[in-house]
Amino acid sequence: MLNDPLFIIAAVACGAVAVILIMGINTFGKEGLDNAKRANKFMRWRIIAQFVAVALILLFVYIRRQGGQ
């Protein structure tokens, strides 16, 4: 499984979601209107990245169940 390119891409996408989430939470902790706007932007990007990660995971599971390597 570790040598499957789709698995690696899905794992990287999950890591990207975690990084974006941490950056957003870190920005929420700071004061100021600019930081609030930036935190909301990070959370919007997190939702998009999370959608992509879930879609990749579902694609990986679908291909593995169809007998793909």
Image (cartoon, helix red, strand yellow):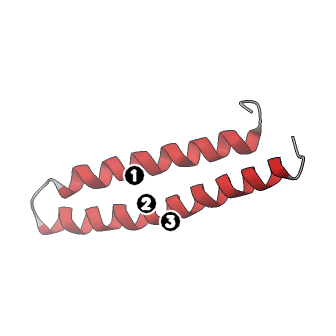
Tag 3 residue? 48
Which three-letter amino acid code belongs to the residue tagged 1? Answer: Ile
- Give neighbour class at mark 2: few <14, some 14-19, many 20+ (Cα, 10 Å): many
**In the displayed image of the protein, which residue is found farthest to the left?**
31
- Give neighbour class at mark 3: few <14, some 14-19, many 20+ (Cα, 10 Å): few
Which three-letter amino acid code belongs to the residue tagged 2? Answer: Arg
Distance of label 3 from label 2 (alpha carbons): 5 Å
Which three-letter amino acid code belongs to the residue tagged 3? Answer: Ile
Q: Which mark is residue 46?
A: 2
Tag 1 residue? 20
- Give neighbour class at mark 1: few <14, some 14-19, many 20+ (Cα, 10 Å): many
Q: Residue 48: where, in percent of width, then height?
A: 50, 65
Instruction: Give the answer, above or below, for where 34 lies relative to 13.
Output: below
- Give yes or no for contact between labels 1 and 3 (Cβ–Cβ under 8 Å): no
Image mark count: 3
Instruction: Give the answer, above or below, for where 40 lies relative to 60.
Output: below
Q: Residue 28: where, in percent of width, then height?
A: 20, 58
Distance of label 1 from label 2 (alpha carbons): 6 Å
Left or right: where does residue 5 sit relative to residue 43? right
Q: Which mark is residue 2?
A: none
Numbered disc 1: secondary structure: helix
Distance of label 1 from label 3 (alpha carbons): 10 Å
- Give yes or no for contact between labels 1 and 2 (Cβ–Cβ under 8 Å): yes
| Quadrant, the C terminus | top right
Q: Residue 14: where, in percent of width, then height?
A: 53, 47
